[in-house]
Image (spheres, grey):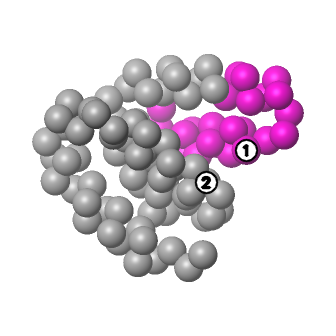
């Protein structure tokens, strides 16, 4: 799932409609099967225009990384701390 698609998926998770939430949750589980999803969440963490999307990306990334840090791609492990620090520096809220 590409970053723009993932951004739309995260936006759907913020909708108040329970049917939309169920469908988005199912699609999110499928997205996490892709090993590139943590990297895309990192991109959304720093580049998403809506603060709610950035916050949700941060929460999902944190939950995904708990206990799975060693299983990540080594390039992502090297880039992720700098990416998160950069996102925090830019965050205004």
Q: Position of residue 15 (x, y in %)?
A: 79, 41
SS state under label 2:
helix
Circle 1/circle 2 CB separation < 8 Å? yes
* Tag 1 residue: 14
Asked which quadrant contains residue 85, the reply is: bottom left
Q: Earlier in the sequence, mark 1 or mark 2?
A: 1
> Residue at left 35%, top 71%?
86
**Magenta span has 52?**
no
> Residue at left 39%, top 52%?
42
Q: Position of residue 34 (x, y in %)?
A: 38, 26
The disc at residue 40 is: none
Q: Residue furthest right?
A: 17
> Residue at left 86%, top 33%?
17
Q: Position of residue 48 (x, y in %)?
A: 55, 59
Any part of residue 61 in sight: yes
C-alpha separation, residue under disc 1 versus residue under disc 2: 8 Å
Asked which quadrant contains residue 52, the reply is: bottom right
SS state under label 1:
loop
* Left or right: 16 as drawn, with respect to 73: right
* Left or right: 60 as drawn, with respect to 9: left
* Tag 2 residue: 53
> Residue at left 57%, top 39%?
5
The main secondary structure of the magenta stretch is helix
- Looking at the figure, which quarter contains the C terminus? bottom right
Q: Which residues are magenta?
A: 1-24
């Amino acid at each position: 799932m590409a970053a723009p698609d993932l951004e739309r998926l995260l936006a759907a998770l913020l909708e108040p409609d329970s049917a939309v939430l169920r469908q988005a949750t199912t699609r999110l589980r499928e997205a996490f099967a892709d090993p590139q999803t943590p990297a895309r969440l990192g991109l959304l963490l720093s580049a998403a225009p809506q603060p709610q999307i950035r916050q949700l990306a941060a929460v999902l990334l944190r939950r995904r990384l708990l206990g799975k840090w060693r299983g990540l791609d080594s390039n992502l492990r090297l880039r992720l701390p700098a990416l998160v620090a950069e996102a925090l520096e830019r965050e205004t809220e």
